Image (cartoon, helix red, strand yellow):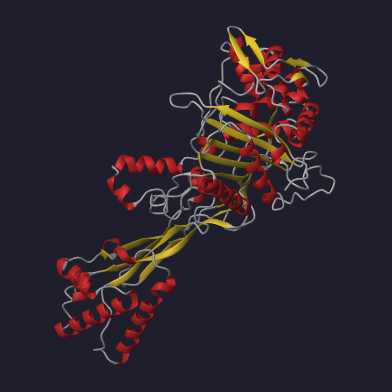
Amino acid sequence: MLSQQTYVSSNILYKRGEIRDRNGTVLAVSIKVYDLVISPKDITGESDSSVSSEQAEANMDFTLQTLVSCFGLDRGELEQIISENPESQYRVISSKKGMTQDEIQSFLDAQESAKESAKDNKEAPQIKGVWFEERYARKYPLGHIACNVVGFTDRNGEVGTTGIENVYDDELTGSYGREYGYFDAELNLQRTIIPAVDGNNIVSTIDANVQRIVENQIKKLMTDMGAQNVAVMIMDPNNGEVIAMASDKYYDLNDPWDLTALYSEEEIAQMSEKEQSDARSSLWINFCVNHTYEPGSTFKPFIVAAALDEGTTNPNMVYTCNGKMQVSDYEIGCANRVAHGAVTPKTALMESCNVSLMQIAAQLGRTQFYRYMKLYGFGSKTGIDLEGEETGIIHSEDGLNTVELATSSFGQTQNVTMVQMLSAFCSLINGGYYYEPHVVKEIINEQNAVVQRNTGDVVKNTITANTSGLIREYLKATVESGTATPAQVKGYDIGGKTGTAEKHGENQEGNYIVSFMGFAPTDDPQMAIYVLIDQPAVEDQSHSAYATEFAAKIMNKVLPFLEVYKDSSAQANTE
């Protein structure tokens, strides 16, 4: 009869899915760990009246001895816990949480040996009131590598908090199994098991080797020069895959709440809870996705491309630069105050001529200017699969008056994000195809079957293939003999554009963001890079060479990893 049956049930743990890089290197994994639990009431023998006081005392002494010898615990502290909690049957030993199988094996062996001894001698002391609770702990084998992309879980290792861990939490999370059982009228245990389902594995687009190189170069730059912010993105221009994404703000994914890398123990002790929370938030922010800024002259290729596509300029059109230009009530200077003289669209990019860009933008007109801004994705989220993406700020079509149109043409008075810029830039150099940027390549189930694959579908076309070819030609010339010559890498044809943007606002006078956006090889781009240095810690910040030299160092190291090999015909002749 049902009234005579006793039911028992328990959860069966599932394993959270792994996160791997594009080559299979594990970036996040859940491993089974064990928490040491004791029952003071069982250790003392108070829970079993059938055991003699002498046997109970022997069991307790043996149990404590084994705990001390196997785990290095303090016997006095254990005895204090037991004496203060005599009725408790559940006390987790906090210093022995998260142990591996190897770490608990000696205790399990001692426990089993004691049981064997009891078969021959019923008075042999036994281990009582000790067991291990199983759970999965989230581990990040590479520590801080790609921390802002991989992200982390809550302290229990169960719920994604940031990065891929957060955005793909539903995929990574499995479902608990269940074991049901009941004792029938004959006291036989009848069992039913519903197995757990492990979470899916995520294959990211990140290359851990390239990511490590980028992060090491950022650290070196911060040591050698310093800056308020430094960030780098590398992308495959042919599918929108983010190969590396890093900034100078990094943390160990195994302990993302730790602030000791940035502050001393004394400083942390003096911080309020809110101050500590704000400090952690600043660490966890992904600069490439969550931060906006004025791009400066790296914006110019977008304007030249739009005008070429619309036919309001052409490769042979000549503009005159006298070093400045009167726009409405304002006199706006060029990057070269002496004057560039006669300038074509190509030399406008090579020499980063503001005056010619203002003329090109004026001919394009605000309606088409605004249309291309939207087409490139500025002022909108790219849809990258990371949380907290900012939209940036662009002028409305009605807001693009004469002055705003002029200043926007060379990257001022509009705000962008790095992921917006690089995604749109890839469309300029790959034939005009805009791919949605993404950091996840595949989702694979526990049987290694592909559940979902991101092949990098074309979202839209921004410019024509002919215009794209011209932009590649112009930007190659910019690195060969224009403002971006420090970006040359021996054995490679590199194309790119420099940027210098003066920061605006209170106490920002003399502060600049310098940047470089480039690609290689120029005839068939396989990688695109964007380097940004916010307020380099030097007396005169307004030199894009800081960024171009930095980009060259990175490209020199990462191009072979990306299987972009040197070409003996490449014109670059510097290291």
In this view, the residue in front, 82 or 564, is: 564
Q: Residue at x 31, y 62 (%)?
A: 7
In this view, the residue in front, 261 or 329, is: 329
Q: Work out which residue is located at the far bottom of the displayed protein and give it.
A: 120
In this view, the residue in front, 122 or 345, is: 345
Q: Residue at x 16, y 83 (%)?
A: 52
Residue 498 visible from this viewpoint: yes
Q: How many marks?
A: 0
Q: Position of residue 328 (x, y in %)?
A: 60, 7
Q: Identify the image quadrant of residue 309.
A: top right
211 versus 405 height, above or below: below
Q: Position of residue 429 (x, y in %)?
A: 74, 33
201 versus 42 height, above or below: above
In this view, the residue in front, 157 or 545, is: 545
214 versus 327 height, above or below: below
Position of the N terminus by quadrant: bottom left
Q: Work out which residue is located at the far right of the displayed protein and give it.
A: 569
Left or right: 158 in relation to 309:
left
Left or right: 500 in relation to 167:
right
Residue 237 visible from this viewpoint: no
Q: Position of residue 517 (x, y in %)?
A: 66, 35
